[in-house]
Image (spheres, coloured by chain):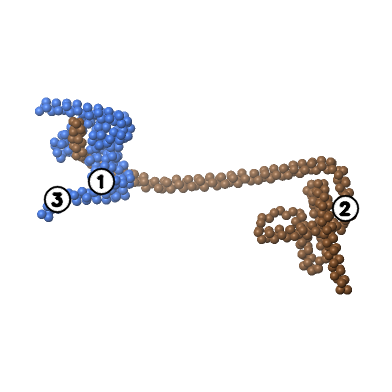
Chain colours: A brown, B blue
């Protein structure tokens, strides 16, 4: 207990003690506080300068990076084009090689099919015409539908095939003739269709870029013609029956 | 009678007035009003120098530590949240500043020399002598003992707080206090023997 009493005693006595600081104590402190205030006032300008310099550096770096990316992008495009061109030529070359192989292998078969085509042409020219007309009509209708859909929905444009282009040309020519002469005969339409059909066939069979006739396409075309012959016969029969009925009705009054 | 009543109420009003004045001064001092800072300094500096003197034997160095403490007080016055007393807040800053000052000065240890400021103890001669003797006893303690003893016995810190501030363990703090007390008792006994011998 003795030390605690002693400690309380000295605590009380020391608490009451006051030591007067030296006369220049406040002046020293005041001077230090003034210096601190000056530093604090300078700080914002310093920070502003630093911020401005950082912004400047960032701007320059961003500009530099943008230029770099543009420079990097350009050769990439060139490279890909070259690769595509190379690929295309390789593919064409490969196709030609394959075609030549196939050509050699199908020489005999090709001769036989060409004979068949010639015989078909000789045997049924009317049937063929009718078939061509019907096919073209269907194509025109489908094209009109697709045009209408494209006009209303404004879908992204697809690459126009040669056939579609020809159909459009034929339709345009018919429209033109209608506007000019107002009377279009079936013969005119048939002539236009036949011409278009010939061009389509030629385009299918003959590759303009390579200058090679596609034997496979030729075979497929002949097969399609054989398939369509029945339909064309039916069409022809219906047409002829309609004509006979028409003449009968016309002759009835006579 | 009226004058007597006013005389009785006045001390209480004075305390309120002082507190109001102090909070007004603090608000002004936060805005770097040098005059307000000066008044606050004059109000608290004698007490704070006495506290710094508990730890630092040299009064000039104690004053240097006190000025460092006041510099921190005025530059960090915004962080004072009026939760405790302003004096208590300054006092804690002074203790920390004295400890860090001693840490910095440790490598340049000067010989112990007790300086008496007779003008400062002019209020009560009896107390002056006693306080001077107490300070001499504390100054005679080794630095570690002195810091722990002053913080525990006079400032009222707990062992875990002392351990945290001095970066020592609680066990070290307790042993330092024990040794300081023992040393002080021996010194008091010697002092008593001497005083009895003289009387």
Q: Where residue B189 sits in the image (x, y, percent)?
A: 17, 27
Viewer-nearest of discs 3 and 2: 2
Q: Nearer the viewer, residue A70 or A139?
A: A139
Q: Quote the CA–CA distance across marks 2 and 1.
A: 122 Å
The residue identified by callout 2 is: A120
Location of residue A162 by image quarter = bottom right
What residue sits 25% from the left and 27% below the top? B179
User: Residue B40 has which mark?
Assistant: 1
Circle 2 packing at 10 Å, graded few (<14), some (14-19), many (20+), is some
User: Residue B149 has which mark?
Assistant: none
**Disc 3 + disc 2, Cβ < 8 Å:** no
Q: Where residue A88 sits in the image (x, y, percent)?
A: 73, 44
> The numbered mark 3 sits on a residue in which chain?
B
The residue identified by callout 3 is: B8
Q: Is residue A116 visible?
A: yes
What residue sits 54% from the left and 46% below the top? A62
Location of residue B134 by image quarter = top left
């Amino acid at each position: 207990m003795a030390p605690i009493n002693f400690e309380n005693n000295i605590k009380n006595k020391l608490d009451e003690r006051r030591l007067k600081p030296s006369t220049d104590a406040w002046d020293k402190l005041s001077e230090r506080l003034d210096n601190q205030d000056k530093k604090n006032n300078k700080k914002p300008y310093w920070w502003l300068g630093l911020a401005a310099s950082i912004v400047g550096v960032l701007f320059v770096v961003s500009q530099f990076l943008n230029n770099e990316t543009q420079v990097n992008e350009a050769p990439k495009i060139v490279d890909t084009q070259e690769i595509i061109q190379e690929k295309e030529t390789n593919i064409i070359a490969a196709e030609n090689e394959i075609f030549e192989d196939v050509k050699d292998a199908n020489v005999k078969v090709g001769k036989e099919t060409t004979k068949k085509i010639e015989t078909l042409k000789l045997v049924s020219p009317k049937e063929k015409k009718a078939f061509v007309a019907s096919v073209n009509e269907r194509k025109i209708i489908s094209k009109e539908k697709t045009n209408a859909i494209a006009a209303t929905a404004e879908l992204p444009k697809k690459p126009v095939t040669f056939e579609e282009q020809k159909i459009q040309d034929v339709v345009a020519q018919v429209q033109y003739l209608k506007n000019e002469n107002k009377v279009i005969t079936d013969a005119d339409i048939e002539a236009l269709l036949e011409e278009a059909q010939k061009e389509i066939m030629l385009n299918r069979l003959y590759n303009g870029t390579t200058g090679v006739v596609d034997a496979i396409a030729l075979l497929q075309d002949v097969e399609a013609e054989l398939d369509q012959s029945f339909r064309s016969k039916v069409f022809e029969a219906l047409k002829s029956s309609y004509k006979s009925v028409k003449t009968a009705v016309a002759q009835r009054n006579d | 009678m009226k004058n007597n009543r006013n005389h009785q109420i006045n001390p209480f009003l004075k305390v309120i007035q002082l507190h109001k004045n102090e909070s007004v001064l603090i608000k002004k001092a936060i805005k770097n009003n040098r005059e307000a800072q000066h008044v606050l300094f004059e109000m608290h500096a004698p007490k704070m120098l006495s506290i710094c003197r508990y730890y630092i034997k040299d009064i000039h160095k104690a004053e240097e530590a006190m000025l460092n403490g006041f510099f921190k007080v005025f530059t960090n016055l915004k962080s004072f949240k009026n939760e405790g007393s302003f004096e208590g807040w300054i006092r804690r800053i002074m203790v920390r500043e004295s400890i860090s000052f001693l840490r910095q000065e440790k490598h340049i240890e000067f010989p112990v020399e007790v300086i008496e400021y007779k003008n400062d103890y002019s209020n009560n001669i009896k107390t002056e002598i006693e306080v001077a003797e107490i300070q001499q006893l504390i100054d005679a303690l080794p630095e570690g003992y002195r810091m722990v003893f002053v913080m525990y016995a006079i400032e009222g810190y707990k062992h875990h707080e002392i351990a945290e501030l001095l970066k020592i363990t609680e066990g070290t703090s307790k042993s330092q206090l024990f040794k300081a007390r023992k040393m002080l008792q021996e010194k008091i006994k010697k002092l008593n023997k001497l005083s009895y011998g003289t009387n």
